[in-house]
Image (cartoon, coloured by chain):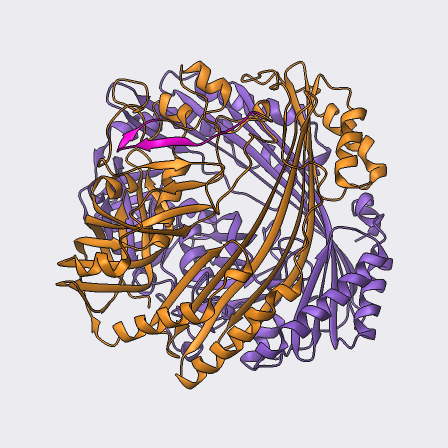
Amino acid sequence: MRQGDIDPEFLSLGLEKLADAGLSRAKNLGATHAEFRVERRKSQVIAARDRNLERMQNVDQVGFGLRVIFDGGWGFASDIDLSPESARIAAENAVAVAKQFRTLNSEPVELVPEPVYDDIHISSYDTNPFEVDDSTKIDHLLSLNEKVLSSSKIDFVDSAILQVQENKFFATLDGSRITQQRIRVNSDFTATKVDKSSGAFETMSSTSPPLGKGWEGITNGHDYFLDAERIPELLEEKIKAKSVEPGRYDLVIHPSNLWLTIHESIGHSTELDRALGYEATLAGTSFATIDKLGKLQIGSEVMHVTGDRVVEHGLSTVGYDDEGVKAQQWDIIRDGVLVGYQLNRQMASKIGQERSNGCAYADSPSNVPIQRMPNVTLQPSPKATSLEDLIGGVERGIYIVGNKSWSIDQQRYNFQFSGQQFWEIKGGKLVSQLNDVAYQGNTIEFWNSMEAVGGKDTFILFGTFQCGKGLPGQVAPASHGCPAGLFRSVNVLNSAQEG
Amino acid sequence: MNIQEKIEEILKLSKADEVVVLASESSSANLRWANNTSTTNGLQKGTRLSIVSIIDGAVGSINATYFPSDSLEKLVRDSEAACEGTPKAPDYLPLPEGRSSGSWEEASESIDLDRFEGLVTDLAATFKKARSDELLFFGYASESSITDWVATSKGFRGRHSTLDAGLSMTLKTPDFKVSQAHTKQLGSMDEAKVEDMHERLMKRFEWSANQLAVGPGHYPVILEPQAVGDILYYLYSQLGLRGAEEGRTAFSKSGGGSKIGEKMFPEFINLVSDPAAPGLETPPFAASASPGARSSVFDSGYPVARTEWVKSGTLENLIASRFWAEKFGRKSAPEIGNLVLEGDESKSLEDLISSTDRALLVTRFWYTRMLDPQTLLLTGLTRDGVFSIEDGKVRGAVNNFRYNMSPLKVLAQTDELGATARAFGRSRVPHLRVNDFHMSSVSEAS
């Protein structure tokens, strides 16, 4: 990859000089490890409501962070003033922080080794969305809204585009120099139907995936205008649909819903920092404790889950993580058994791993890198199992599309998910929509009830821009590709009867 | 050039019909610990600048965190260029006439590491106690200072400064089977009382000696302020006038319009926001970098004052920018950054427990999400301490639950208020005794 492909405004920030100033000061002060990160994060949100532009927000965030190990403990400082003098002061502050809190260190920080790299990485995209005229994006949203509102079945529509360009320059005392640029885009819309006489209302959203793509991710991927044509009809049917009878049902779950169940129940439970208790104050711990590695049957034998930071267009895909570890792919669950965790360099050392698998990420220059979720993928069946095959195998069940409400406990056992569309299955065929469906379960029971996964033709890469973790709070993007899945005898609630 | 001079320079450079400039400087320090050792920490400085140009009613804005003096002209021109090709905002109103608020010239405050000195000493002592009790200690402490400046081309100049701190402490058994947590939102780190918080956690470990299994069902509950705050956040997020008038929130009325004027809760329920609420102060003026139905750039500089959302159980007001309030014939009530649910300061938690025959005591909720916006039905889980109360006494700790419950029902079914404490963001809420709360299933998490 050529340096010329990286945003020249980022390269003009005097990256090397800043890093040299900060790192050399940290070394002189006695830091045994130091890493310096300059980041620029450009983002744009455009939101339209009905036939009007609601909001267009452009944010340009620039700054640097410097993290040291001093006397066996971490110290971190950040600033927004991009001068060598500020970098030197940040090094002094980071060491002062480490000194201030060292009486509380009972375990010296240890990092597994990683080779030194001098490299440039740019994510895979065709058209940088920041080079597309704002008017083109506004037109896209207003045309979409017009299409939805052209149906008399809809009262309101809200739509939005979100795009991010993330540049990072990473330098370490031991010589790594890594420059990266990533692009991601997301767009969706929600249609609302209101019955003012009864005070009732119902919504339905598009099921479009956020992706590590450029503007082509909006125009050449998911067919938003097909959604705009279908959703008014689907929403009207949903409003008239019968309310589900609570009980046990077989579920066929579309990737637009299943990705989030994977994210919450498998993605978060297999973060090693969480399993070891390092997230206990906020995000919680995990049922997947280290004594269960290689033993715990999390799911059925058709369950094969990988972690990676390499898949093309993945939201967590990078060249290197924020500790300078080269991107990799590995198994988390094989044949239904827990076989791996997500690691950063410190967590890897805690369980005797020789190398991190590269899951460190900081969401801004002012935050420290912590272990964050890679792309966590449920692999499809090697067989050519179709969605119709899965539905065909169900006598009495529900087919669920899209996600709406999600919640899981702090050890990732008890979850409850809702969706956008729920279709009754009878005798292997879709009958009609249902309403008020939510499925509730225990992670291990749920994944062990997975009888089959679809083949690669049912596989879709979904994900999120906004996964929260850490204190101070950080958000991270992650993709979750998955096929459709068939689950037997899952507890289904009627949400209207729950309150 | 200091930040005030940069703002004045931006106003001079502007060629827009109207312009709003929002700037802030922040400074913060934090410390996190787990498994009886410190984990992460940091000392952070930040700035932010928003320039909002308004040309023929169209809005163009830029937000930057790095804006040296020689970049200002380009930023102003970029914000003006962003108006091109942008349709006129449908809720455009001319900016309000200027006045001033706060001491404009005053600089921002930096957080110094020395402010953590006492805390570190107290934490070191608690680490020692945890080890001798064979417990694991987890937590997070932070202090932050944010100063905001807002200026408009109509002459408004406003400044507001906020100092906030927080201390969160969790104690667990080494197998994580018992977990007790307590979080305090503070005015500054000087207010941190580590020993008191530790004492409270140890009391709850005593309560946990008797472990009881309780199944799902409908129970009377006493919710501690953190739990109340967790669900009221969602109520506040739905308290907008526009959505209610359009028929798409839980505050919409059958037949059209909003539920303003409707008695929704018992007489003793009063929910207010007040920029001058002691310890929860927020800017006494509206400020926003974009149009919106709750807060709008077109209201920037508009004075805001104490607003009663619910008075004696009746819905009195809903959040509305000037434009949307006028459109629906209601009083303008821009969003205010705090929330107070009034309580009864004479009733401690112990008083509530001793006057309760049977209930579950809930410390906090976790992963609360909307399940049905029509009824404001939420789902979430209990965490870090649920206890069984019988005959005015705590009988032991019980398992965690998933709940499905609307905060509207929580307030409607409250039969007793207790003393208040700070909760989410800048809120102050009381203990609540609720006579019917739906625990939908048991969570194995501990």
User: Is residue A377 in view from this perspective?
Assistant: yes
| Residue B92 on the magenta span | no
Left or right: B166 as drawn, with respect to B203: right
Identify the residue at image location x=45%, y=38%: A207
| Residue B310 on the magenta span | yes
Residue A422's place in the image compared with A138, above or below, is below
For the C terminus of chain B, the quadrant is bottom left
Left or right: A433 as drawn, with respect to A125: left
- Residue A201, by quadrant, is top left
| Residue A438 image point, x, y percent | 29, 46
The color chain A is rendered in: purple
In the current view of this chain or complex, which residue is farthest to the bottom?
A: B132
| Residue B348 image point, x, y percent | 28, 57
Residue B106's place in the image compared with A342, above or below, is above
The color chain B is rendered in: orange
Instruction: Report the span colored magenta.
Output: B302-316
Given residues A41 and B288, the one toward you in this image is B288
| Residue A155 image point, x, y percent | 39, 20
Identify the residue at image location x=44%, y=32%: B306
In the current view of this chain or complex, which residue is farthest to the front?
A: B346
Given residues B398 and A407, the one toward you in this image is B398
| Residue B202 image point, x, y percent | 35, 74
User: Is residue A414 in view from this perspective?
Assistant: no
- Residue A66, by quadrant, is bottom right
